[in-house]
Amino acid sequence: MELLVSGNRREATKGPRWLLAHAVAVFAFLYLPIAVLILYSFNGEGVGGFPPRHLTFDWYRVLFSDGPIWDSVWNSLHVAFAAMVISLAIGVPAALALDRAQFPGKALFRRLVLLPLILPGVITGLSLLMLFNAAAIKLSLLTIVLGHGTALISVATTEVFAGLQKLDRAQEEASLDLGANYWQTFWRVTMPNLKLSIIGAALLIFTLSMDEIAVSFFLIGRDNTLPLEIWGRLRRGITPEINAVSTIIFVFSLVAIVVWYRLRMRDGGTEAGMEVVEAVGGTAS
Amino acid sequence: MFSRAYKTAVTLPPLVWVAAFLLSPYLLMLCYSFWSVSAVQVIVHHWSLDNYRELLRVGVYWQTLFRSMWIAARVTIFSLLLGYPLAYFLSFHAGKRKDLFYQLVIIPLWVSYLVRAYAWKTILGSDGVLNTLLQYVHLTQHPLEFLLYSPFAVVLTLTHIYTPFTFLPIYAALEHIPRNLVEASHDLGATPGQTFWKIVFPLSIPGVLAGATFAFVLSLGDFLAPLLLGGPSGIMISNIVVSLFGAAYNWPLGAAISFCMLLLVGSLIFLSERLERKWSFS
C-alpha cells in the first residue's frame, strides 16, 4: 500500500517520460528559428550555409550606418506610440462601458471590438483601405496609426476589463459617498487601481504595433515602418543585416514581454495574457 | 451607482470610434462586393451579384480556397498535436518550473511574425541552413528542393507561429480543472489513461476548440507566409485578394472574396463558441 501510494505520487509529479521529451522537442521547434536567426547575424558568409563561418560584427556595423533602416525604426516607434495612445483612449472607456453600462447593441459592440484580434489581418487592412479611399484620406503613417490604434483597442479593453473584475467597487462607492465627483473618483480611485492593467496593456500594444505587418501592408504610404522596410528588402535579396536588425528587435521585445509578464503576475497572479486569449476564445464567458 | 452622464461619457466615444473604424469599413466592404470595375478601371456603383456569380463560376477561386482550408487544417492538427501535450505537461507535471515554461511558450508568441517567417526561409532554402547541414554530414548530395517554396514550408512556418496560440486556451482550460476530480478518479482506481480520457480530456475540450479556431482562422487568412515561402504551389486565398487589390485592380471582386472569408470566419467562431458552451461544465 505504502509503495503504491508513493508510486502514484511520483507519477503525479513527474508524468510519463515521453511527455517531457515531447515538451523539450516543442521548445526546440519554437526556438530553433530564433537561435538560427541570432547565430547567423554574426555569420560573415551570409544567411545560410552550414557550419557558420567567419563570425563577425560586420553586419551590425553595416546596420548602424544604414539610414533607411533607422528612419523606419523611428517611424515604427512613432506609430507604436500613437497607436498605443489611441487604443488606450478608446479601449479603457470601452472596458468601463462593458463593465458598467447597459446600452443597445452592447453584444455587437463587444464582438466588433474583439474581432480584429481573431480576424486575419488582410480583412482588417483591406476594409480600412476602402474606408480611407472612400474618405479621400491619403495613405501615410497616420493611416497606419489609425489601423493599429483601432485593431489594438481589443488588447486594451480585454486587459482593463479583467482588471475591473478584480477591482473593489466599495472603494469607488466610498469616494462618491464622501463627496468626490465622478471625475475625481475616476482619476483618484479607479485609475490607480487599474494602473498595472493599463501599463501591461500599453506595453503589449506597443510591442504588437512595432511588429505588425499584415494591416500595415495595405495602409502604407511613402514612409515605411520597420517590418515593411524589412519586407521590402526580403524581396530584393537578403543579407545577415536583416538578421542583425531582427536580433535587436528580438532583444527589445523580450525585455518588454518579461516586464509585462512580471506586471501581470504582480497584479493578481493569473497567467499573463490569459485575459486576451479567453476573451477571444470565448472560454471566459 | 454610476450616473447616466458617467455611463454616456464612457460609452459614447468608443461607440463612435468603433462605428467609424470597425463597423463602417466592414459595411463598405460589403457594398464594394456588389459594385464593379469599368473597362477604364473606374469603380462603377451599380449594384449586382455579378462578383459572387463570378466566384461560383471560376474554378481557381474554389481550388485556392480549398487549398487554403487544407493548409489551415494541417496547421491546426499539427498545432494541436504539439500544443496539447505541452499544455498538459505544464499544467500537471511541470511543478515549480511551470512559470518559467509558461514564459518560454509566450515569448515566441510576441516575437515578430515576419522575423520568424524570414528565419524559416533562411533555414529551408536550397543553400539554407538545413540543406547545407544535410550535405555537410553527407546525408544528401543535392539540396532538397521541396523544403522551400512549397505548401510544406507554409504549413511548417504557420504551425510554428500558431502552436503557442493553440497552447494558451488549452492550458487555461486544463488549469481550470479542479484537481480533486483528478485525485478522486485516481483514488477510485482509474488508471492514468482512464483518468485522462474520462476526466481531463472532456473538460479541456472548450480550450481545444478555442485553440483550433485560432489556428485555423488565422492561418486560413494568411498571405505573408505564402508570399515569402509558398512559391506557386503554396498560393492561398488571401494572395488572390491581395493581387485583386493590387496589380489586377478589381477591388469589388476582392471585396466579395474578403466578405466570403469574413462570413466563413464569423460562422466558424460562432460554431466554436456554441460547441464550447455545450462542452463547458460550469
Image: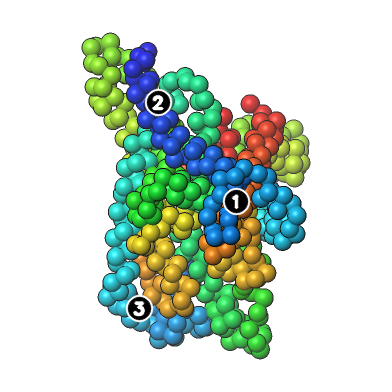
Residue B144 against residue A274 in the figure, above or below = below
At 49% from the left and 59% from the top, the residue drawn is B113
Q: How far separated are the C-alphas under marks 1 and 3?
A: 49 Å
Q: Secondary structure at mark 1?
A: strand
**Amino acid type of the residue that numbered disc 3 sits on in the rendered structure:** Trp
Closer to us: mark 2 or mark 1?
Answer: 1
At 59% from the left and 81% from the top, the residue drawn is B126
Choose top left, top right, bottom left or bottom right for residue B73: bottom right
- Measured from the top left, where is residue B262 in percent x and y? 61, 44
Nearest to the observer: residue B254 or residue A39: B254
Q: Chain of mark 2?
A: B
Closer to us: mark 1 or mark 3?
Answer: 1
Query: Mark 1 sits on what residue?
Result: B36
State the mark number for residue B240: none
* Earlier-in-chain disc, 2 versus 1: 2
Nearest to the observer: residue B4 or residue A204: B4
**Amino acid type of the residue that numbered disc 1 sits on in the rendered structure:** Ser
Q: How far separated are the C-alphas under marks 2 and 1?
A: 38 Å
Nearest to the observer: residue A99 or residue A260: A99
Nearest to the observer: residue B38 or residue A166: B38
Residue A274 against residue B249 in the figure, above or below = above
- Measured from the top left, where is residue B215 in percent x and y? 61, 51
Q: Label 3: few (<14), some or many (≥20) within 10 Å?
A: many
> Is the residue at mark 2 from the same chain as the one at mark 1?
yes
Q: Look at the numbered discs 1 and 3 and tell me whether their residues touch, using CB distance below 8 Å.
A: no
**Amino acid type of the residue that numbered disc 2 sits on in the rendered structure:** Thr
Query: Mark 2 sits on what residue?
Result: B11
Q: Quadrant of the C terminus of chain B?
A: top right
Residue B37 against residue A113 in the figure, above or below = below
- Measured from the top left, where is residue A4 in percent x and y? 70, 43
